[in-house]
Image (cartoon, rainbow, N blue to C red):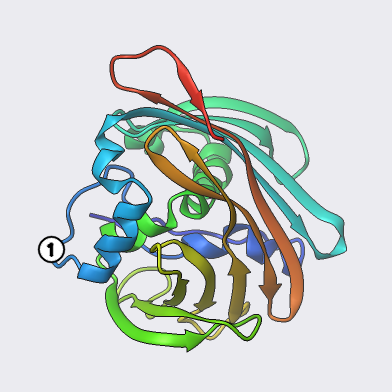
Amino acid sequence: MSRTLILARSETRHFNLIFLLALSMLLVSPAPSRAEPAIAEQIAKTYGLDSFGQVEAIRYTWNGEFPGGHNLSNKWEWSPKTGTVSFEGKDKEGNPIKVTYQRSQISSQSDVVKKEVDPAFANDQYWLLLPFHLLWDGAAATDEGQQKRPTGDTSAQRVVMKYPSEGGYQPGDTWDLYVGADKRIEEIVYHRGAANPPHLVSAKYADYKRAGPLLISTDHPGLVDGETFRITITDVSVKLTGSDNWINAQ
């Protein structure tokens, strides 16, 4: 199993956030971790882990609003079982792109797909399926009990997910998940394992919707090293095994 290297664009500091949260191992086909932390599994099951095998395809649009007016919108369709990805958006020069490719054949793709589109896919899908990836990746989980949330005076169960200190693009990445009694993530705090910025990201997980068996948080306002950003996930729908119909999130 390999880790996907996520390369930040160099035009502006704020573009570093575009590929921020896919800095760790990305498994495009779910497989059981060698050591599945019980709390991580509970959280992932809340989001539909047990039914993920029924999903033939997922559609969604990832939207990012960053300081300085740097806004992005990436439209995706992904088939988990075949690794087929369709993308509609823009390259780093602002030119429109529309492409379909197989992730298993990424080496034969153009540089734009290899260096821009596929890293963006990894990042955007991480926002979509964060609870699954933390489990699939085998990050070590620690349940620290009820702790004060980063925003507000209320408390939530804090679950710390830490990646290994060796290997990968960003070894030692740590995620603090603030989880409600219903095992839904309410907020996250991300601590980057490497010394280079951005060092600290916090975001809310809000506006939950169901798309078939999957529970999706579609709104993520937050801060990156003290500056505001917002990521929203819109137009979410899934197609299940044996059906030609798309089920819209609602």
Q: Is residue 140 left or right of residue 68?
A: left
Q: Please tell me whether residue 211 is drawn above or below residue 30 in the rendered image.
A: above
| Position of residue 192 measured from the top left corner of the image (x, y, whole percent) | 50, 79
Q: Is residue 168 left or right of residue 21?
A: left
Give 128 or 147, whichever is nearer the viewer. 147
* Residue at which label 1 appears: 34
* Residue 232 in view: yes
Q: Is residue 78 left or right of residue 65?
A: left
| Position of residue 55 measured from the top left corner of the image (x, y, whole percent) | 33, 31
Q: Is residue 61 left or right of residue 46?
A: right
Residue at left 38%, top 64%?
183
Specify the quadrant of the image occupied by residue 209: top right
Quadrant location, the N terminus: bottom left
Q: Callout 1: few (<14), some (14-19), or many (20+) C-alpha neighbours within 10 Å?
A: few
Residue at left 39%, top 55%?
4
Q: Please tell me whether residue 154 is drawn above or below residue 103 in the rendered image.
A: below
| Position of residue 9 measured from the top left corner of the image (x, y, whole percent) | 66, 59
Residue at left 40%, top 62%?
182
Residue most toward the top? 244
Residue most toward the right? 68
Give 206 or 114, whichever is nearer the viewer. 206
Give 186 or 84, whichever is nearer the viewer. 186
Amino acid type of the residue that numbered disc 1 sits on in the rendered structure: Arg
Q: Please tell me whether residue 146 is drawn above or below residue 7 in the rendered image.
A: below
Residue at left 35%, top 54%?
46
Circle 1 SS class: loop
* Residue 26 in view: no
| Position of residue 100 measured from the top left corner of the image (x, y, whole percent) | 50, 25
Quadrant location, the C terminus: top right
Residue most toward the left? 34
